[in-house]
Image (cartoon, rainbow, N blue to C red):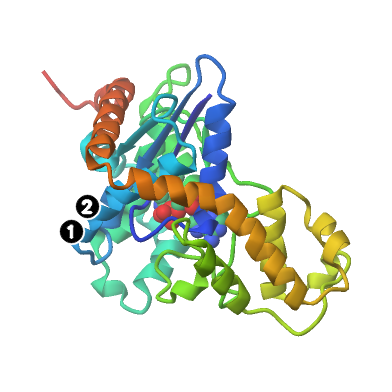
Amino acid sequence: MRVVSGIQPTGNLHLGNYLGAIRNWVRMQDEMEDGSQCLFFLADLHAISMPHDPAELKAATLEMTAALVACGIDPAKSVLFNHAQVPAHAELQWLLGGTARMGWLNRMTQFKDKSGKNREGASIALFSYPVLQAADVLLYQATHVPVGDDQKQHLELARDIAQKFNNDFCTEDAPVFTLPEPYIPPQAARIMSLRDGSAKMSKSDPSEMSRINLSDDADTIMKKVKKAKSDADVLPSEAGGLEGRAEALNLVTIYAAVTGESVDAVLGQYGGEGFGKFKPALGEILVETLSPISARFRELKEDRESLDAILARGAAKARELGSDTLARTYAALGLVRG
Ligand code: TYM
């Protein structure tokens, strides 16, 4: 089993990232069997697809590294690195560029969302970003890719690219690429904004009140939960009763995901109660879960030297793990390399 996943180092790590992806990275890392390997990376090359401030990107890359370690990613067990120190990602992206089709990329909803009405003004990097994401996983022969629901379409594209490349350039018994399987958690695959139940919780939402950051202190968490959009009705006793109540469903889903219970079990406990009772309880379990992480994060982010060393060590290992696939890709395409 080869587990590979990444996160963009923009802004703070938030509860959606944690429940939708990072918590599963940690689980997969801790349950790894002999011969398996986990690779997790900061997708800093992806972060330059949108307008950005170089100094902020540098700081965010190190802070996100500290946040991942604080969440439980152990650099002694997993390979933890950033794109920019492993040039094979960018190389493989170019090599896959002959296989990926414009029509496939035109269908990517994230490109449509992020480019908005200004399609002509979007960067080339934003358009071709899913090809880099395919390279990220195909480079390491990933079998499992733990992500939130919003990345599903990108992973389907990675499978399409791998399949077409294998068909076009390889013999049936010697394909270059493994087809990766997305691992999307059954619960918490899409945590929504605390201000709008129809928008996902996101690092790029201008409102800080829309998300809970893993670095938030207890008071901030309690305040954000208290101010979260909800409604005046009591909670139903079964999940079906939350239909049409997106904000209420989101808050109950967060409670269930954090405690590891089902939504029905949470409603079994709080059905008939209003948000005046539910929100403080939710705030408390969030503080309990997140405060050890934020304490560790605050400590780690000050140790710049250790963070640099973690990324350098991880990158050296990643370069080694990706070298064979990269060489086989060049060879399959008929490119002469001495
Ligand atoms: P990014 O940085 O937006 O998010 C990192 C991970 O967090 C998940 N996630 C969520 N899950 C549930 N609810 C939410 N509100 C929520 N918001 C984010 C994402 O699904 C993701 O798993 N393109 C990717 C990074 C990437 C990548 C890759 C991922 C680059 N290369 C290769 C997997 C494999 C991204 O921007 O994720």
The part of the image, by quadrant, that contains residue 271 is bottom right
- State the residue in front, 309 or 17: 309
Label 2, secondary structure: give it. Answer: helix
Residue 174 placed where, x, y %? 43, 18
Instruction: Please state the horizontal and vertical placement of residue 72, each as a whole percent of the image.
Output: 49, 38
According to the picture, the residue beneath numbered tag 2 turns out to be 58
Q: Residue 94 falls in which quadrant of the image?
A: top left
| Mark 1 Cα-neighbour bin, 10 Å: few <14, some 14–19, many ≥20 | few
Say what amino acid the circle numbered 1 marks. Ala
Picture layout, residue 227 above or below residue 35: below
What's the residue type where badge 2 is placed? Lys
Q: In the rendered view, does 289 fall on the left or right side of 300? A: right
Other-residue count near label 2 (Cα within 10 Å), few / some / many at <14 / 14–19 / ≥20: few
> What residue is rendered at 57% in x and 18% in y?
33
Q: Which residue is mark 1?
A: 55
Q: Is residue 14 visible?
A: yes
Q: In front here: 335 or 277? A: 277
Residue 322, percent from left and from top: 32, 26
Q: Are marks 2 and 1 in contact (CB under 8 Å)?
A: yes
Q: In the figure, is residue 262 to the left or right of 223?
A: right
Identify the image quadrant of the C terminus: top left
The CB of the residue at mark 1 lies under 8 Å from ligand 1: no
Residue at the spot 31% in from the left edge and 36% down from the top edge: 81
